[in-house]
Image (spheres, rainbow, N blue to C red):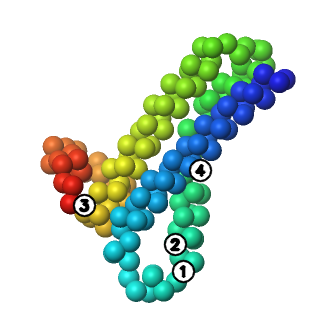
Amino acid sequence: MKRFLNLVVYILTIHVSALLIAGLFRLVLFISSYHQLTSEALSDKTLPMLAFVHGVWFDNVIGCYILLLPLVVAVVCGVCNYYGKALFRFFTIFFSVFYGLVYLISASDIPYFAYFFKHINSSIFEWFGYAGTTAGMILGESAY
């Protein structure tokens, strides 16, 4: 039972760490976009906190989707009483790949938002025909 609890603590530690890193991306986005806020938005001091709470909620939803497979694998391994190094290696690689994608999108969203004044959504798929131009806009322009 103790080994299973250690496994769950390991998974939850990764989840909380991922939420903190995603919060840092949100903070960078907020600081870089602060000059675009209207006077009405600046007058309401609770609005940024509410936005960050909504951001944590959204990041938690994404994190829970990522956690689904590792938690199922952890329960199956707990029932089978398997806690080998391969299991932790699987979790490390799995979380590294998926949270790496999440952080890549979050990092790309900062210049994308500065350029288009909207967040990356499914409309980004329309730009796949212009992948070179879009990548150049995101990676090459330091003014945004």
Q: Number of numbered discs present? A: 4
Disc 1 crowd, CA 10 A, few/some/many (<14, 14-19, 20+): few
Q: Which residue is mark 1?
A: 45
Mark toward the start of the polypeptide (2 vs 4): 2
Q: CA distance from mark 1 to mark 4?
A: 24 Å
* Whether residue 105 is situated above or below residue 58 in the rendered picture: above
Q: Which residue is at 72% across, 32% downward?
A: 8
Q: Amino acid at mark 4?
A: Asn
* Whether residue 9 is situated above or below residue 86 in the rendered picture: below
Mark toward the start of the polypeptide (3 vs 4): 4
Q: Secondary structure at mark 3?
A: loop
Q: CA distance from mark 1 to mark 2?
A: 7 Å
Disc 4 crowd, CA 10 A, few/some/many (<14, 14-19, 20+): some
Quarter the N terminus occupies = top right
Q: Position of residue 143 (x, y in %)?
A: 21, 60
Q: Secondary structure at mark 2?
A: helix
Q: Which residue is mark 3?
A: 144
Q: Which residue is mark 2?
A: 48
Labels 1 & 2 near each other (Cβ < 8 A): yes
Discs 2/4, front: 2
Q: Amino acid at mark 2?
A: Pro
* Left-right relation of 70 to 105: right
Q: Which residue is at 59% across, 64% downward?
A: 53
Q: CA distance from mark 2 to mark 4?
A: 18 Å
Q: Which residue is mark 4?
A: 60
Mark toward the start of the polypeptide (3 vs 2): 2
